[in-house]
Image (cartoon, rainbow, N blue to C red):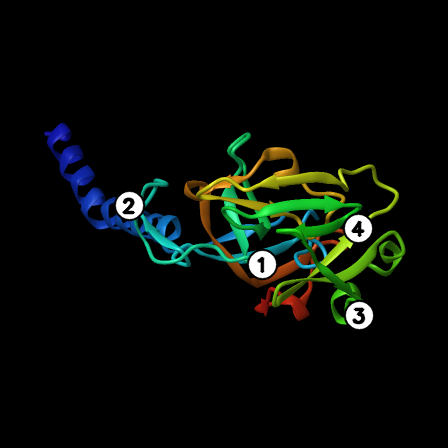
Amino acid sequence: MKQIKWREKSSRVWREWAKPLLTILLITGAFRSAIADWNDVPTGSMKPTILEGDRIFVNKLAYDLKIPFTTVHLTAWADPKRGDIIVFFSPSDGVRLVKRVVGLPGDEIELRDNQLLVNGKQATYRPLGEQISNQIRAEERSSYRFAAEEIEQGSHPVMSTPRLSALRSFTALKVPADSYFVMGDNRDNSKDSRYIGCIPRGKIVGQAKTVVLSVDPGNHYVPRWERFFSALP
């Protein structure tokens, strides 16, 4: 009799609590896997565009539709463009990274003393507005050199750190078909295509365009309200 009552109670708990909860978790997981997600940024490889402590919104439908919980593409309707900030799985170790696309399939990419060349044409560098550079701690700013890098019609912030040892030059290389050359906006402190190679199309998770929220890990995780729901340049 006790065993029957226990089974009845277990069945009731499953129907009333466990099954609905599991359904919600599956739906939420599928949504985050195939449609939209967020990505916490623990490093400064995309400074001054993205800061440590930012949480960015990732649009997983920006380029294609995948089967939930997999990287299998069902259909594609767009490809990453030069200047897009993408989230992808590193081909070297599978870690999820955030970088900017600078080279498209078939492009020739070259770097000369941190000056980027695309298909033989050198990018244009102009002074970066203080609105962006001032979001970095005042005591750190003197260590960096800031600029707005313009390639074709697009412009985005970049910075360098002269005191660091970094790969600032490489000879021209051709981006393979169905792959992309990515770099961090923090040019001297980024593990990007200079080190891990070009990113296959199938490794791309989605596009990042917005900072959803932001906290300052160097100041007791105080919210940086001015960065909440701000667009990424």
- Asked if labels 1 and 2 touch by Cβ distance under 8 angstroms, the answer is no
227 relative position to 69: left or right: right
* Kind of residue indicated by mark 1: Gly
Residue drawn at 84 percent across, 40 percent down: 164
Q: Position of residue 138 (x, y in %)?
A: 86, 61
- Real-space CA distance between mark 2 and mark 1, rounded to the nearest whole angstrom: 40 Å
The mark nearer the N terminus, 2 or 3, is: 2
Q: Residues within 10 Å of mark 3 (few under 14, many from 20)?
A: few
Q: Residues within 10 Å of mark 1 (few under 14, many from 20)?
A: many
Q: Nearer the viewer, mark 3 or mark 1?
A: 1
- Real-space CA distance between mark 3 and mark 1, rounded to the nearest whole angstrom: 21 Å
Q: Position of residue 180 (x, y in %)?
A: 52, 45
The residue that mark 4 highlights is: 160
Residue drawn at 55 percent across, 30 percent down: 92
47 relative position to 79: left or right: right
The mark nearer the N terminus, 1 or 4, is: 1
Mark 3 residue element = helix
Residue drawn at 77 percent across, 70 percent down: 129
Residue drawn at 84 percent across, 56 percent down: 145
Mark 4 residue element = strand
Which of the labelled discs sits on residue 83, or is there none? Answer: 1
The residue that mark 3 highlights is: 130
Q: Nearer the viewer, mark 2 or mark 3?
A: 3
Q: Nearer the viewer, residue 53 or 192?
A: 192
- Real-space CA distance between mark 4 and mark 3, rounded to the nearest whole angstrom: 16 Å
The residue that mark 2 highlights is: 22
20 relative position to 204: left or right: left
Q: Residues within 10 Å of mark 2 (few under 14, many from 20)?
A: few
* Kind of residue indicated by mark 3: Glu
Q: Position of residue 61 (x, y in %)?
A: 38, 57
